Amino acid sequence: MNRCPITYTPCGKNSYSDAGLRLLSAELKMLKELEYTAEEQRKEAYIRASKMSIQGVQPKLSARLNIREGKFEIVDKGGKYILKPQHHLYPQMPENEDLTMKLAHEIGLEIPPHGLVWSKDGTLTYFIKRFDRKGQNEKVPVEDFAQLAELSRDTKYNYSMEKVAGLINKFCTFPAIEKLKLFKLVVFNYLIGNEDMHLKNFSIITDDGKVTLSPSYDLVNTTIEYKNNPNDEIALPLKGKKNKLSSNLLVDYFGIESCELTAISIEKVLETISSSVPKWKELIAISFLSQEMKDKYHDLLNTRLSILQIK
């Protein structure tokens, strides 16, 4: 029996479940495989890189969903989705990102519609719907924190998490609400091994006159995939530290002092995470990662949960 790469639910002999198709569109009846191999997608991403406004480690393509023909089409303009094929250096990046985004959704972090789609060579490509587009062609204002801090792609690590909280105070409409989201996101990234949350991976979005943190994106367990700096546990330092993080540092110092959260608010976040751990482990087990990568993900998660004293 097949398992749907969008929802992880059994789908019989079909490639996708009905629920997975509905996640993309209520009108979608079937979804064809991508008309490119992973290598061909990477080549297309390289050729079209100058036309993409979103950069990063992973090759990316802009796409639109052709509901009538039941397929994703690669486009230069007007794309509502981003596709990320298999990386030639880092194995199972699409499977890793898709799983990690699902884990984030389980604890209430805002996540755009996303999933995995089969390519013609049998590999899986990650897709995510763009949150900076709505309607036909309307762009929603989004600024990443490198822009807010007046830094560049080359200096996106030259900051601190304390200053990130300060940017929320400066730019968000209701800073207290957004700093609680930030705290949850930072704790989550530590637990699942994302040590590459630099300034380009935090953004604010302006919609209906209100400035908030954008939906989360680029959430990957980089610790089991790749590491820029082998000893780092976080991209932007906390109290000058990037490794050997502790409950005191993440919860007491960052949560209470830097984000100015109440003990009750913090406790609710930690309780939400604790209650989600069984579901997390279930999702890891049924994900499309290899057994070796599943084991690494599971072991890291258990270690980090223990450090933060989350049961």
Image (spheres, helix red, strand yellow):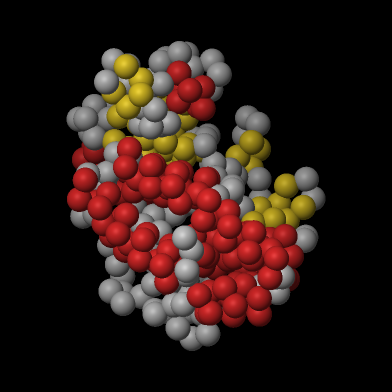
Q: Residue at x 50, y 27 (%)?
A: 24
Q: Quadrant of the N terminus?
A: top left
Q: Nearer the viewer, residue 36 or 1?
A: 1
x%, y% of residue 118?
30, 29
x%, y% of residue 92?
26, 47
- The quarter of the picture where residue 233 lies is bottom left
Q: Quick check: 245 above or below 87?
A: below
Q: Residue at x 29, y 67 (%)?
A: 227
Q: Is residue 294 left or right of residue 186?
A: left
Q: Is residue 82 left or right of residue 230?
A: right
Q: Nearer the viewer, residue 89 or 165?
A: 165
x%, y% of residue 87?
26, 49
Q: Nearer the viewer, residue 264 or 195?
A: 264
Q: Quick check: 198 above or below 47?
A: below
Q: Quick check: 103 above or below 148?
A: above
Question: Most extreme residue toward the front, as rendered?
Answer: 311
Q: Residue at x 41, y 67 (%)?
A: 306
Q: Residue at x 66, y 76 (%)?
A: 256
Q: Judge whether residue 297 can be spotted in this image.
A: yes
- The quarter of the picture where residue 165 lies is bottom right
Q: Nearer the viewer, residue 41 or 230?
A: 230
**How many numbered marks are there?**
0
x%, y% of residue 178?
68, 61
Q: Judge whether residue 57 can be spotted in this image.
A: no
